[in-house]
Image: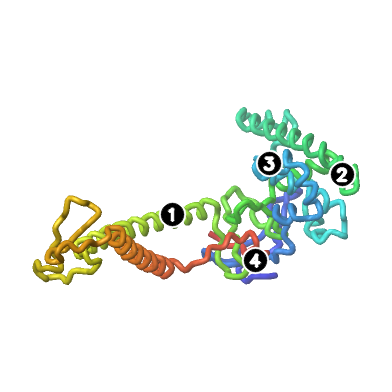
Amino acid sequence: MTHHKVQYPVLFGQGDNQYPAMLALEDIEKNETIIKVPSREIINTKKAFYSELEEMFYEHPELFSKTLNDGEDMILHSFILHEIQKGKDSIYHQMIKMWPKDTDIVMNWEEEDLDYLQDPTLKYEAERQYNEMMDSWNRLYAVLSKYPKQFKAESISFYRFKWVFILTTNRCFSSNWPGVCQMVPWCDQINHENVNVNYDCLDAKTGERLMTWDEKLEVQRQEELKKEDSKGRFLTDLKNDLQELSNQFDKTTGQIIQVGSGPNEHNTIRIQTDKNKIVKKGDKGEELDKKDIDERTNKLRDTLINERREKNIAAENKEDSSDYSSGIESDNDLDLLVE
């Protein structure tokens, strides 16, 4: 794939220190797509987990659980080691063949080389990272060696693991796709400078940018606030409506009093000593059942509540008809955007 604003490959550096990268020929605008990579060519933690190694991952949550800091790294390392072992039978063979064999990071330097830096902090970080790599290797080897049908001994040697560890450290893409890191062919050749680059994953169906975990939480928070506000408005309106109904309701007859009518024999009551009996003036002691009056009152109140609830539901549906996609279930391609 070519783009008129970029050129690839271009060698940067001098002498034996040259490396291939991409050269921008023109300014690249924000959100302008310069590369599209089919998702089938991308290695990511989601694909790795649901591969033929899935059973092994489930059998060892102490190593591969997503709740662990390096759980997903272990999944990715295992998957890549397994794909390298396949050779040409791997669908990622061309990508693997492009990976440099002499890749390096500071943690792999000899101690005397680290001393040349004259930076105790950097030396300490390099040694710490090396110790973490050794710890990861020992724990991973202890599990992979239990599966000789999936992993040959030479495929899980320390030197093979260290190469994969350095590759994923140098070339693995983090992005806005929650919980997913990925190895993207060709795109890992683009950036070799000490600058921050953001990679956005787009939903294959909608073309919209996937949301990060923080963005998802913010959407949920806003939805909860909206629900609380709607609930508050509902209760306030219900209280006002019940008050208005109480002001207009004639408890002796179960009927609504017409606004503006004065006192008469239909809306004037007197209270007797028997609290369960209420008599209208002029009815000469005709007794009405208080239970029947309460039932009429409750029925009117329930009808009012249901009407109010239906109005609020209709209003909420009208305000927010958006669908939010996590993107995890979509087999999306990766668009590289420049920000």
User: How far separated are the C-alphas under marks 1 and 2?
Assistant: 47 Å
Front one among 258 and 167:
258
The residue under label 3 is: 70
- Closer to the chain start, of discs 1 and 2, is 2
Q: Which mark is drawn over residue 35?
A: 4
Q: Secondary structure at mark 3?
A: loop
- Comparing marks 2 and 3, which lies closer to the viewer? 2
- Comparing marks 1 and 3, which lies closer to the viewer? 1
Front one among 148 and 27:
148
Q: Residue at x 87, y 56 (%)?
A: 87
* Residues at marks 2 and 3 touching, judged by CB atoms closer than 8 Å: no
- Closer to the chain start, of discs 1 and 3, is 3
- Comparing marks 4 and 2, which lies closer to the viewer? 2
The residue under label 1 is: 224
Amino acid carrying label 3: it is: Asp
Q: Secondary structure at mark 1?
A: helix
Amino acid carrying label 1: it is: Glu
Q: Position of residue 250 (x, y in %)?
A: 20, 64
Q: Where 116 sits versus 18, above or below? A: above
The residue under label 2 is: 147
Is any part of residue 137 visible from this angle? yes
Q: Residues within 10 Å of mark 4 (few under 14, many from 20)?
A: some
